[in-house]
Image (tube, rainbow, N blue to C red):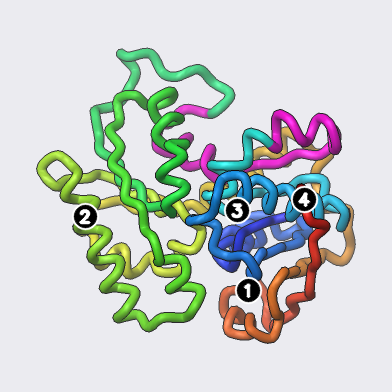
């Protein structure tokens, strides 16, 4: 199975698009609901928690895992990919959700060099909404500077928004939060103008309609779930050894470190009906 990990429920937006884009693949979703959200946690904890969750997915038979949590991808991905995997699971792979977004913004494939100056498009301003840790990590900014230095990025941390979404706050309450965040981001942009917006947390597409309402009508909002699903399809095409298409019938399973009974409200977020979350207890790292 292909593993998809998130600190809570936001990664279900990634799972939903991946199941649409890759209907022949099997998936195992794991949400660390007991310790969500990750956005305000210590970096060491984020690395350890992510390692525990990925290890759990590997133990359940996954050979390829997507870090569908922007915070985990920003803080832990490089450490796990460069240090932990070679020592413990050299035949497994971990992918993040930041690369597909930067590729879309820059128009440059990750494995290709940046475009020469005379081939770059006009300068544009991109707005990034993310958790405090994602913004603090500067991961998006650093990669954009490498691959799309002609683009200007303004960033806005969104403390409390993930928790509000997880807790099922009303649309009116969520819009008030998002409207304030959008105003603060636009105030940082030259002339209050941005061309594109990145919802740099997998929870945020769940309230994309509220972001669209809060931002000027001309702003393009990039769909991270769709970009990640396309990137996964491309990766499997190039690395067919990680395909799960041979599994019959196709399976989709859900694990949580929290209480499955408290996740019944997620039924509408799942690719299929029901509330099939099973309890997962990680082997504690460190």
Element assignment for label 1: loop
Q: Pointer 3: residues within 10 angstroms few (<14), some, or many (20+)?
A: many
- Rendering coords of residue 67 (x, y %): 64, 49
For the residues marked 2 and 3, what is the alpha-carbon distance in whole angstroms? Answer: 26 Å
Callout count: 4
Query: Of the residues tagged 2 and 3, which is closer to the observer?
Result: 2
Element assignment for label 3: loop
Q: Earlier in the sequence, mark 2 or mark 1?
A: 2
Overall secondary structure of the magenta section: helix
Q: Earlier in the sequence, mark 2 or mark 4?
A: 2
Q: Which residue is mark 3?
A: 68
- Rendering coords of residue 117 (x, y %): 32, 14
Position of 160 relative to 61 (above/below): below
Q: Pointer 2: residues within 10 angstroms few (<14), some, or many (20+)?
A: some
Which numbered disc covers residue 285?
4
Q: Earlier in the sequence, mark 3 or mark 1?
A: 3
Q: Which residue is mark 2?
A: 184
């Amino acid at each position: 199975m292909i593993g998809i990990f998130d600190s809570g429920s936001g990664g279900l937006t990634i799972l939903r698009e991946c199941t649409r884009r890759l209907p022949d693949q099997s998936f195992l979703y794991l949400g660390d609901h007991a310790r969500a959200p990750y956005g305000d946690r210590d970096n060491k904890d984020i690395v350890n928690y992510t390692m525990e969750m990925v290890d759990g997915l590997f133990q359940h038979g996954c050979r390829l895992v997507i870090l569908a949590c922007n915070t985990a991808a920003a803080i832990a991905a490089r450490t796990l990919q460069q240090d932990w995997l070679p020592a413990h699971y050299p035949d497994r792979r971990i992918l993040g959700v930041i690369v597909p977004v930067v590729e879309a913004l820059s128009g440059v494939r990750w494995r290709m060099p940046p475009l020469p100056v005379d081939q770059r498009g006009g300068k544009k301003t991109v707005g990034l909404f993310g958790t405090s840790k994602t913004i603090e990590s500067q991961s998006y900014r650093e990669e954009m500077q490498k691959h799309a230095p002609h683009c200007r990025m303004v960033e806005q941390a969104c403390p409390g928004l993930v928790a509000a979404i997880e807790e099922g706050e009303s649309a009116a309450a969520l819009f008030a939060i998002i409207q304030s965040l959008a105003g603060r981001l636009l105030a940082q942009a030259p002339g209050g103008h941005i061309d594109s917006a990145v919802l740099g947390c997998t929870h945020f597409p769940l309230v994309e309609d509220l972001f669209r309402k809060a931002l000027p009508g001309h702003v393009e909002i990039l769909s991270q779930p769709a970009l990640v699903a396309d990137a996964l399809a491309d990766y499997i095409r190039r690395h067919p050894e990680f395909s799960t298409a041979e599994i019959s019938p196709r399976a989709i399973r859900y694990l949580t470190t929290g209480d499955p009974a408290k996740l019944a409200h997620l039924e509408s977020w799942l690719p299929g009906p029901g509330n099939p979350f099973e309890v997962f207890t990680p082997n504690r790292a460190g």
